[in-house]
Amino acid sequence: MSNVSLMPGAERLIAHLRRHNIPMAIATGSTLESFRIKIFKYQQLFKIGDNFQHIVFTRDDPEVSAPKPAPDVYLVAAKRFKSSAESHKCLVFEDTKTGVDGAISAGMQCVMVPDYRFQYIQQNATQIIKTLFDFKPELYGLPPFED
């Protein structure tokens, strides 16, 4: 697990949203321990306070009563923003069917970036893109990329 790579375009997207003061959080099905292993090479990128306001761990958070595809982790993440975010104003990026289902059931828009190593069937994502380089922020009311 320590050889996990970022999705293509992830650093660009995070830097862009940070530059424009767009609040970001992570809602993950991972435990804190497995998340630390996955991000080992990218600790600075995922440091709380720099790019992300908070991280909600489905399996380790007492406020999250059910795992994805339940909406719990997304609703808790939205609630924990400095100014609690309304669900319909949240945009989620997901790579799994259960994640997309949870985000949509939370009332959020969801861009799916599937892991093509695995077969997926998804019909309810707001949008499906091949990589984060294909994401167009302006379609969601966000500032467009400058590059």
Image (spheres, rainbow, N blue to C red):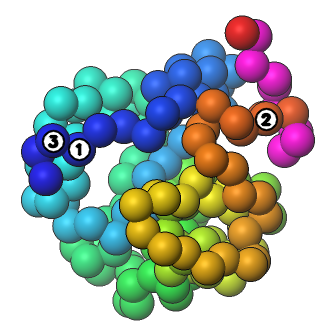
Q: Residue at x 75, y 77 (%)?
A: 124
x, y percent for residue 126: 79, 64
Q: Residue furthest top?
A: 147
| Mark 1 vs 2: CB contact within 8 A | no
Q: Is residue 134 above or below residue 72?
A: above
> Which of the pair 83/101 is nearer the observer?
101
Label 2 sits on what residue type?
Lys
Magenta residues (range): 139-146
Question: Secondary structure beneath disc 3?
Answer: loop
Q: Residue at x 88, y 41 (%)?
A: 139
**Taken as a whole, is the magenta stretch helix, strand or loop?**
loop
Label 1 sits on what residue type?
Val
Disc 3 or disc 2, which is closer to the eye?
3
Question: Secondary structure beneath disc 1?
Answer: loop
**Residue, disc 3:** 3
State the CA–CA distance, disc 1 to disc 2: 25 Å
